[in-house]
Image (cartoon, grey):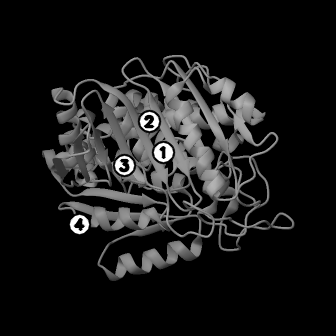
Amino acid sequence: MSSLSRRQFCGSVAVGLAGAAVGTAQTAGSFGRILGSNGALRVGVVGVRGRGRDHIGGLRRLADVRLTALCDVDRDVLGSRLEKAKADGDDVEGFTDVRKLLDSGRCDAISVATPNHTHALIGVWAAQRGIHSYVEKPIAHDVWSGRQLVAAAKQHGVVVQTGSQCRSMTANQEVMAFLRSGELGRIVLARGLCYKPRGSIGKVAAPLDPPPQVDYDLWLGPAPFEKVRRRQFHYDWHWQWHYGNGDLGNQGVHQMDLARWAVGATAMPKQVLGVGGRFGYVDDGETPNTQVVFCDYDEAPIVFEVRGLPRAHGDKQMDRFLGTGIGVVIHCEHGYVVLTSYDKGHACDLDGKVIRKFEGGGDHYQNWVDAVRAGDASKLSAGVEIGHLSAALCDLGNASYREGALHERESVADRLRALPDLNEAFLRLENHLRSNEVALSGEWLRVGALLQPKPDGSDRPRPAQRDEFAMPELV
């Protein structure tokens, strides 16, 4: 039997046994890596309405990558994307249930751009079938689920990238090398900023039925079953706890990842404390639109700030800090570095004079495909462990906030005085809210519980899950 016919034979066996026992999944994973290194990599995209549309375009541009499957629980969205893909010449099949896609034998790898609460579960399902994955940020909705995905990737030998594309940008790689050179001295604080306009999502008078074209049971996945409590079904799930992580885990996870990269932190922090609230309107959103999180590391602390309101009431502009609103500022002994976008930044001395500029992009999809072809997760810019740790910091910040309680101004000041970096950010937060004419009286600010996570995050609770969509416990 020739090697080619042997490969074809093994392929038919792998397709027939996809989704079976762990040993079979490992064999299928090995086969997937062989296909990726010897022919066109067959890729499916799961969740194609918003970010998934970029996945389709980004993957189709790559040489020797073939788009073979699309999946979405919204039949209208799926139909539109399928029509476009077929018009572009792709031999593509559509699915509403990702499990059927994974068992179809059409894909060696998938990219995942579904709502946050399903990210890790889909990644684990793929790993169990020997299928590589690119999982959008945050790689998991909670710490526990993220740890299961890390374990699944290791157990089944698959390549899992997270959508932290800043790690593939040459500008950021050069920034990190510059910081490690010591030219600005020791890092004393990394500050992440997410000053992004977020208005009210409105308030419904009573729970709603989901849109008729959406398979709502599949959309919910592991989340508890309840009717829709938001006017806009798509996207606004980001601001409800069952499905999203607020802007801290939405936009902010990019900047949190850069801040953690800068300080060189490779484990859980010693402690986490978050403060904030949802101010300026009353709506069906649950996550804070104004938030400060303190992550205590021996290397240097990380302070993260979220602001969804403008710089002042009636204004359309957002606040800025040292020239950036969605970015990172790394404070050092002899100056600071400002990352102003995904692929730009500059270094300043203590007087604010720019002494060096950084600029340059990269292709995060290509990085993933190259690692898949090589069967080598170490080639990834942002592998599963990186994605898990950065997402965990966002989840811990939110967990601290949710486990805390409302306090008056004097009580807040007493609690934060021992953490000067957090307190400084809190004082600026107060001024920001005053500029937005938010009343700061009575018990107005939620001060989080002081969390001291274990190094592996094993103390965080396992979330409630529906049986059909329960995450397997691997660690």
Query: Which sits earlier in the primary sequence, circle 4 or circle 3?
Result: 4
Q: List the residue tagged with mark 3.
A: 322
User: Percent from the top left, x then y, of residue 85?
Assistant: 37, 75
Spatial CA span between label 4 and label 3: 37 Å
Residue under the point 53% across and 38% down: 425
Residue under the point 42% across and 49% down: 321
Please name which of the two marks, 2 or 4, marks the residue nearer to the observer.
2
Asked if one can make out residue 358 in the rendered structure from this viewpoint, the answer is yes
Q: List the residue tagged with mark 4.
A: 61
Q: List the residue tagged with mark 2.
A: 390
Left or right relative to 401: residue 283: right
**Residue pushed farthest right?**
206
Spatial CA span between label 3 and label 2: 24 Å
User: Percent from the top left, x then y, of residue 430?
Assistant: 63, 45
Label 4 SS = loop
Label 1 SS = loop
Amino acid identity at mark 2:
Ser
Left or right relative to 267: residue 316: right
Q: List the residue tagged with mark 1.
A: 138
Residue nearest the viewer, comparing 49 with 215 = 49
Spatial CA span between label 2 and label 1: 8 Å
Number of callouts: 4
Alpha-carbon neighbours of circle 2 within 10 Å: few (<14), some, or many (≥20)? many
Q: Are marks 2 and 1 in contact (CB under 8 Å)?
A: yes
